[in-house]
Amino acid sequence: MVRRFATVVQIMADRPDALSPKGMGSILGEVGLSEQRLAMLLSARGATFAALARRTAKRVVTAGSPLPYRDFGRLLLLDSRPDHEREAEATRIRVARDFQRSSAH
């Protein structure tokens, strides 16, 4: 759990002046993340997910967009925890839905 928190803090520290409660799916759509990369991110678990989350956050920061810390944090903290799988899956579905909506515009 400490590593999960450390990863969340590391992502937030990349751009602390631009943290945004805006949804991850919307922001990833705005920065032009491909559907394939989003699918890889949302289907990954464990160390692979943490690495992809850090890489995706770097891309958001490089694009100059606000960082969706709530969704990143929620997914990282709930990752691979069977007692919270339903909540994590609901977050993944919301991210994918918001991504599709932002890509349609």
Image (cartoon, grey):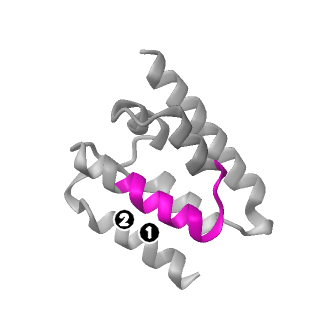
Disc 2 residue crowd, few under 14, some 14–19, many 20+, Cα 10 Å: many
Of 10 and 90, the residue lying toward us: 10
Asked if the stretch drawn in magenta spans residue 48, the answer is yes
Q: Amino acid at mark 1?
A: Val
**Residue 19 in view, yes or no:** no
Q: Residues within 10 Å of mark 1 (few under 14, many from 20)?
A: many
Marker disc for residue 11: 2
User: Which element type, helix, strand or loop, lies under badge 2?
Assistant: helix
Q: Kindly identify the residue that appears in the image at 77 percent across and 53 percent down.
A: 86
Whole-percent x, y for residue 23 in the image: 46, 41
The kind of residue tagged 2 is Ile
Residue at 71% across, 49% down: 89
Start-end of magenta stretch: 43-57
Count the numbered circles shown: 2
Tell me what residue is drawn at x 32 percent, y 49 percent: 59
Gap in Å between the C-alphas at discs 1 and 2?
A: 5 Å
Q: Which residue is mark 1?
A: 8
- Residue 93 in sight: yes
Which image quadrant for residue 45?
bottom right
Magenta highlight on residue 97:
no
Give coordinates of residue 28: x percent, y percent: 42, 38
**44 or 96, which lies in front?**
44
Tell me the quadrant of the picture where the N terminus can be found: bottom right
Residue 105, x across and y down, in percent? 41, 15
Q: 99 above or below 14?
A: above
Residue drawn at (60%, 41%) of the image: 39
SS majority, magenta = helix
The reply to whether discs 1 and 2 touch (Cβ–Cβ < 8 Å) is: yes
